[in-house]
Amino acid sequence: MKNQELLVKQLNALMKGDEPEVVEAAMAEIGYLPAKSNADPEQEKAKMEEAITKASADAVEAYKKQVAEVVDLCAVAETPELAGKMVVSGMTREEAQDAIMKAKADAGDNIVSTVSGGAGESVNYLIKDAESRRVK
C-alpha cells in the first residue's frame, strides 16, 4: 500500500507542475534516481561551438569546391559568361554541365567538323548525313 501512496504522491507532483526538486524527491521516494550528468556545462558548450565551427568550415569548403568546378567547367566549355549565373543559382557540376550542353545546342545550328570529305571530294558525306539527321 505504501508504494501506491508514493506513486500517487509522485503523479500528483508531476501533474501539479511542482518545482523540479519536489518532483525529483517524490520520484526518489519510490526508488527512481535520474542519471546525473558528470559533464561540465562549459566543456559541453565548448564542444558544441567547436562542432558548429567545423561544420561551418566544411560547408564553406564544399561550396568553394562546387564554385570552382562550375567555373572550370564553363572555362573548358568556352562559356565563361554562364559561370556567374550558375554559381549564384547554386548549380552543381552536373547541373551546370547539362545547362552548358543545352545552351550550346540551342545556340548552334551548324555542325562543324574537322573531318575532310576524302581525297579530292568536295562533299563530306559524314557531315551531310549528320545534317540530315539533325532535329530542327
Image: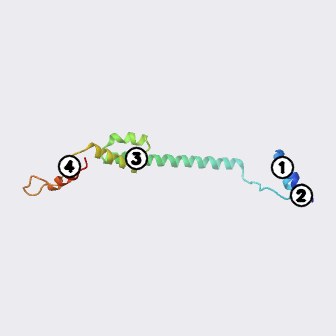
* Pick the front one: 6 or 31: 6
Q: Nearer the viewer, mark 2 or mark 3?
A: 2
Mark 3 belongs to which amino acid?
A: Ala
As measured in the structure, the alpha-carbon distance from the residue carrying label 3 to the one carrying label 4 is 29 Å
Badge 4 or badge 1: first in the primary sequence? 1
Q: Which residue is identified by label 3?
A: 68
User: Left or right: 71 with respect to 38?
Assistant: left
Question: Is disc 1 surrounded by few (<14), some (14 to 19) or many (20+) residues within 10 Å?
Answer: many
As measured in the structure, the alpha-carbon distance from the residue carrying label 4 to the one carrying label 1 is 82 Å
Badge 3 or badge 4: first in the primary sequence? 3
Q: Secondary structure at mark 3?
A: helix
Q: Which mark is residue 112?
A: 4
Mark 4 belongs to which amino acid?
A: Val
As measured in the structure, the alpha-carbon distance from the residue carrying label 3 to the one carrying label 1 is 58 Å
Q: Position of residue 5 (x, y in %)?
A: 91, 55
- Quadrant that contains the N terminus: bottom right
Q: Nearer the viewer, mark 3 or mark 4?
A: 4
As measured in the structure, the alpha-carbon distance from the residue carrying label 2 to the one carrying label 3 is 69 Å
Q: Which residue is identified by label 2?
A: 4
Badge 2 or badge 1: first in the primary sequence? 2
User: Outermost residue toward the left?
Assistant: 120
Q: Position of residue 117 (x, y in %)?
A: 12, 55
Q: Position of residue 116 (x, y in %)?
A: 14, 54
Mark 1 belongs to which amino acid?
A: Val
Q: Which mark is residue 130?
A: none
On screen, residue 67 above or below 115: above
As measured in the structure, the alpha-carbon distance from the residue carrying label 2 to the one carrying label 1 is 16 Å
Badge 2 or badge 3: first in the primary sequence? 2
Q: Which residue is identified by label 1?
A: 23
Q: Secondary structure at mark 4?
A: loop
Question: Is disc 4 surrounded by few (<14), some (14 to 19) or many (20+) residues within 10 Å?
Answer: few
Q: Quadrant of residue 124?
A: bottom left
